[in-house]
Image (cartoon, grey):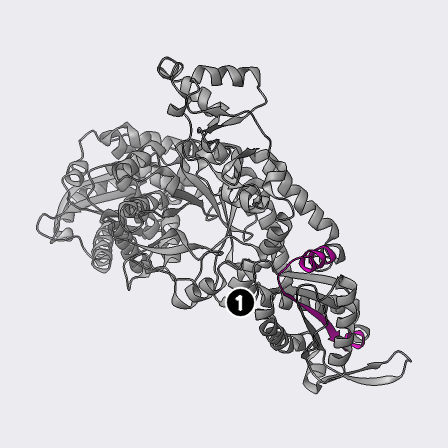
Amino acid sequence: MVGLSQHIVTGVKPLVLKLGRRFYHLLERLNLPVKAWEWPASPSRVPELLREGQWVGMIYLDIVEFQLTEQVYGSLYCQQVLGILDRLVKKQINALLEPYSLLETRRWGDDLVIYFHSFSQSPPAPLDLSRLAERVKESLGTELNLRCSHLIPTALNFHVGYSVVRPTRENFEKALYNAYKEAVLVAKSQLDAREVKRRQQFTELLLNKNIRMVYQPILALDSGQIIGYEALCRGPENSFFASPLNLFGYAEKTNQLYALEKVAREKALAGLAGDLAGYRLFLNISPHVVHDPSFRADEIRAYMDQVGAAPERVVFEITERTSIEDFRTFRQSLEYYRQHGFKVAVDDAGSGYSSLQAIAELQPDYIKIDLSLIRDIDKNPTKRILVETFLTFAEKTGSQIIAEGIENSDEMACLRKIGIPLGQGFFLARPSYPPPAVYMEAARMLEENTGTGTATARQRSRLGRMIPVGSISQAVTTIDTRTVTREVVDFFTHYPQVEGVAVLDEEKQPVGLVMRDKLFNQLGTQFGFAIYTERPISLVMDCQPLAVEHDTPVEVVSQVAMARSDHKVYDSIIVTKNRSYHGLVSVRQLLDAITSIQVEAARFANPLTGLPGNRQIEAELLNRLSGEQPFSVIYSDLDHFKGFNDRYGFERGDQAIKLTATIISEQVARHGRPDDLVGHIGGDDFIVVTRPEVSEEICRKIIETFDQKVPELYDPEDRERGYIDTKDRQDRPVRLPLMTISLALIDCHPGQYTNPEELARTSAELKKYAKSKEGSVFVKERRRRST
């Protein structure tokens, strides 16, 4: 008995010889063994009918263990059996197939394929087809055994399979091949009637492009603005294929993933001219699809040109349904699409074994953090650390992080605190059509906190204000609008270290920018040199360069510069002072300054919580005390922390400190102001520098959240009792209640305090008074000091 792969090939190759060589080459690439037979020379009507849009039925018969029968009884007897089978088929098959008509039969060895059709009848349903095949099997089997009993005394049985070849005008060889494979699988009892029906439904789904697209928004978490939509594919409603897991899983199972993704791409891209106008489109593709001949960047771009959409608006989202075996080749394939302007994202980062390698190898424009890391990130410090690591990596490689699967307000608040720039999830909006707006609750929360940023972002912004962009700018030679282009070329030639020059008007105000590389590229075109060399530089300059005031923080300038379109992102930035030219800053200088700020911040941050340490706290207080604006300082201290630390150990004590840091940071992020400071003085002592109008609300929210979350740090039996048994400083047994938090709030008016030490002394008195009260409390300094 030949193997399954050999059945497929030996059953199809003779047909291939009649249908053309393309299919034969396909089989050769499969490296399957081909058995030599004497093939009939008559032409097949099947391809003609398929091209005309007609269906063709197929019944496959295979004599069970015929190879063994041949070894036992000899090839002479078995050849006679096959001859009798041919005569039986010729005599009986027309009657057995009614109400359908026989097209032709093909036999290769003990494999028999019967093709049938009807111009007036629809193709049989899977159950009817099964019954028809069984009828053919039973009738031929019974008659064959009667006529062959004198040759072979043992009973002969058939495997029977069946399938329907759907009409197609293209690639009918592939349709025949898939139908044959399906029939063989049925014959080997690997497919039942229900599965055959499902295969037919999926084939019709692809043929009629009967899928629907839904869209889920991707938001900028700092502003709440929708920057794009992810296109998601769904099958017909109320069907097995309505679920994307079933839809794509079945496509992969039946080797039709290319076909499904092609239909999905066409439907998703069609939205760029309508519902998605102005937004980025995130399009899921499997890694292997880059090898699909129908997935061509030039064709996709040509289609987008027709609908007036730029390739930069399309982001190919690489999923991990299949692993990437050869990253070098895959990266080269992706580069072809990038050259046409398309962007790349890596999906589900952190969920699969190859996701980190994919990020490192592919250097994507976007990194989508898997929802498994986002789920309960507000409650899981380890997840926060992992996501912060991804963010740091992204910032250093020029990628943008998208947090997937945001399902509640706490997760979103935590992600904003960390500094994650983009997000999507059910809390923001579920996938639907037409593309949805952001849900009201999420929109309200984002609107209320717009401008406050996150704890990490605020910390960077505050540190960035210590270095105004004007301090790192260089007074590079300028030119005016009447300067001849040839002179600018000569200038760049003599000063190769200069990347760009500003163009000024008569009032010395910047009106344009000329970058060396762009100028030379423009002049290097076929007629560029002849057209522009002797003409004013104003004809080739960038008339809308990025210009900022000299006192703008370098961090703010960096964010604005990186938000420019791709072809401008590395252009120099013009720095002005009272709108007059002050100097130029290159992107390299800007990034060097940001790096220095971050390194400096890391040096003096508290190692346990990552919050600013005493040096930064002192600098902030001195800056506030020397200013003319009132501010508030909140000092916090944990009650009964030492007893907790002694009872549970230092590791649990560190958890309590980190939990306190998280609670304070989150509440300041939600209710504070962009320039607020959260610092870690040391141990269980923290400080908040904020504005008087929000200070009391911050205190109340810190206490409320602390009392809610701190019991989770205790063992269940201690939490249930509401106290722990430990020892005091004199080693005497003592019973301590659960930890509480005491806050000392001081409003500081201009000139009221002269140095941080005075504030510290006042806060020490207030904290002592607060700790004398039961439970979590905050006390406020009511005395007004004379100025």
Which of 755 and 233 lies nearest the eye of the viewer? Answer: 755
Q: The disc labelled 1 sits on which kind of residue?
A: Asp
Instruction: Tell whether position 262 is magenta.
Output: no
Q: Which residues are magenta?
A: 618-644
Picture quadrant of residue 649: bottom right
Which of 563 and 187 lies nearest the eye of the viewer? Answer: 563
Would residue 87 be seen by someone viewing this image from the given angle?
yes
Determine which residue is flagged by label 1. Answer: 410
Q: In percent of the image, x 20 and y 29: which residue is there?
A: 41
Which of 552 and 572 lies nearest the eye of the viewer? Answer: 552
Q: Estimate the x, y position of residue 780 in percent, counting from the top left.
A: 68, 77
Q: Is residue 419 above or below residue 671?
A: above
Q: Estimate the x, y position of residue 132 in percent, counting from the top left.
A: 20, 56
In the picture as drawn, the residue positioned furthest to the left comes out as: 120
In the picture as drawn, the residue positioned furthest to the front comes out as: 787
Quadrant location of the N terminus in the rendered image: top left
Would residue 74 be seen by someone viewing this image from the given angle?
no
Q: Residues within 10 Å of mark 1 (few under 14, many from 20)?
A: some
In the rendered picture of this protein, how many numbered marks are placed on residues?
Answer: 1
Q: Is residue 275 above or below residue 780?
A: above
Quadrant location of the C terminus in the rendered image: bottom right
